[in-house]
Amino acid sequence: MRAIAISEPGGPEVLGITELPDPTPGPGEVLIAVQAAGINRADIVQRLGFYPPPPGAPDTPGLEVAGTVAALGAGVDAWSVGDRVCALLAGGGYAELAVAAAAECLPIPAEMSFEEAAGLPETVLTVWSNVMQRAAIQPGESFLVHGGSSGIGTSAIQMLDAFGCPVYATAGSAEKVEVCQALGATRCVNYREQDFVEVLLEATGGRGIDVILDMVGGDYVDRNIQLAAVDGRIVNIAYLQGSQVSANLMPVMLKRLQLTGSTLRAREPEFKAALVAEVRARAWPWLDDQILQPVIHQVFSFAEVSEAHRVMEASTHIGKLILSWE
Ligand SMILES: NC(=O)c1ccc[n+]([C@@H]2O[C@H](COP(=O)([O-])OP(=O)(O)OC[C@H]3O[C@@H](n4cnc5c(N)ncnc54)[C@H](OP(=O)(O)O)[C@@H]3O)[C@@H](O)[C@H]2O)c1
């Protein structure tokens, strides 16, 4: 099969198409004929040599795919050959064939293209796991996502809006702000022009935000603590601006805040299977009802993978970047 290899740690130019042996599905796994794969920030970090695949995962990058089931491993009865699925992977998605746990596959809604579906698993599962489960957000509680125009952010805004929460976001340009508000954010702050703590304290009548989903870190750690409401929860899924920070923790005690976080890729299969089942039951109907729609910035052919990584690194995109074999 054709797959994308990282020839050595480095810039986007180290990515290229190579030939690899076809993988075979083990017990409880399915083989997917990949039509499209989602690009994630983690793929960039892996390409740079700082995020090796977990033990047992392929070296080929790619954490999510969409395609058709091509073969079933022993004991799989939930799927049939030919089913249209999207799947979460621990690696190996930038390829013509990928092996996924049967329990980490989700059906592609009717009418949805492979390119759209390939952008769903990472964002929807990460948001559900961190915001609905870890932070245990309740309908009516206020929610803020930093990086509102990111793949994660565009899903988070729509999902929390559907969940019945007033949604706030931050983003780095006027165009990004507009898209976040069109997706359902009550208010999106352009952090390059305004102080989001000031604006959002005012917007919430001084009450602050109940749940904050943060991928930025750096000085946002201290500012999130200032902005959080009493009994607020702050969940970090990345620290793009650094994890070594200085912060005043006094409000953590005074406001009874919870600072938490998680990474999805390294979680045990049982956790991922339970998460996928919950998301299929609770969030997947939003796709059928078109309350949740994938936001795709651009689809690249696999041969253009280096260019696709350059676009992500420039951070000018809004929503997901997708690779396609079409
Ligand atoms: N922990 C987990 O399980 C998990 C799972 C999935 C993703 N993630 C993480 O979540 C983050 C979002 O993922 P994604 O795939 O949606 O990525 P993405 O689309 O590239 O989004 C990152 C966004 O963060 C904003 N940003 C703020 N400071 C930044 C900085 N210093 N460098 C780069 N971007 C910065 C950018 O928008 P502005 O223009 O508004 O600044 C950018 O759009 C990534 O860091 C990813 O690794 C974590």
Image (tube, grey):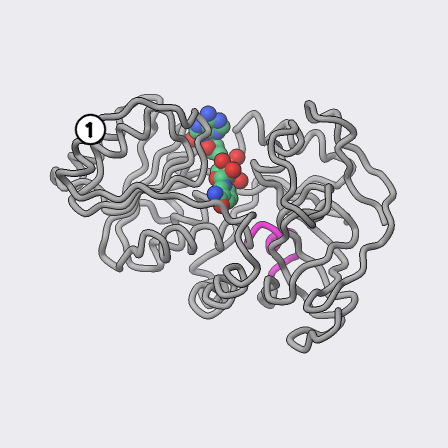
The image quadrant of residue 322 is: top right
Would residue 286 be found to the left or right of residue 46 on screen? left
* Label 1 crowd bin: few (<14), some (14–19), many (20+), radius 10 Å: some
Q: Quadrant of residue 46?
A: top right
Q: Does residue 72 appear left or right of residue 117 in this picture?
A: right
Q: Does ligand 1 reach within 8 Å of label 1's beta carbon?
A: no
Question: Residue 187, how many percent across, how many down?
Answer: 28, 40
Residue 151 visible in the shown view? no
Q: Who is closer to the viewer here, 255 or 293? A: 255
Q: What residue lies at 64% left-to-right and 57% top-to-bottom? A: 113
20 within the magenta span: no
Q: Secondary structure at mark 1?
A: helix
Front residue (pair 175, 197): 197
Question: Residue 70, position in %: x, y?
Answer: 78, 65
Res 241 quadrant in image: top left
Name the residue furthest front.
55
**Residue 298 in picture, x, y percent from top left:** 62, 40
Residue at 70% x, 70% y is 83
Is 246 rendered above or below residue 68? Answer: above
Q: Report how many numbered discs are placed on residues in the image.
A: 1
At x 69%, y 23%, the residue is 10
Amino acid type, mark 1: Glu
State whether residue 70 appears in this view.
Answer: yes
Image vertical order of residue 69 relative to residue 99, above or below = below
Residue 140 placement, left or right of 174: left
| 152, above or below 217, in the image | below
The residue tagged 1 is 198
Magenta stretch: residue 115 in it? yes
Q: Nearer the viewer, residue 47 or 53?
A: 53
What residue is rendered at 23% in x and 47% in y?
210
Q: Which residues are magenta?
A: 112-120
The image shows residue 73 at horizontal and vertical percentages of 75, 69
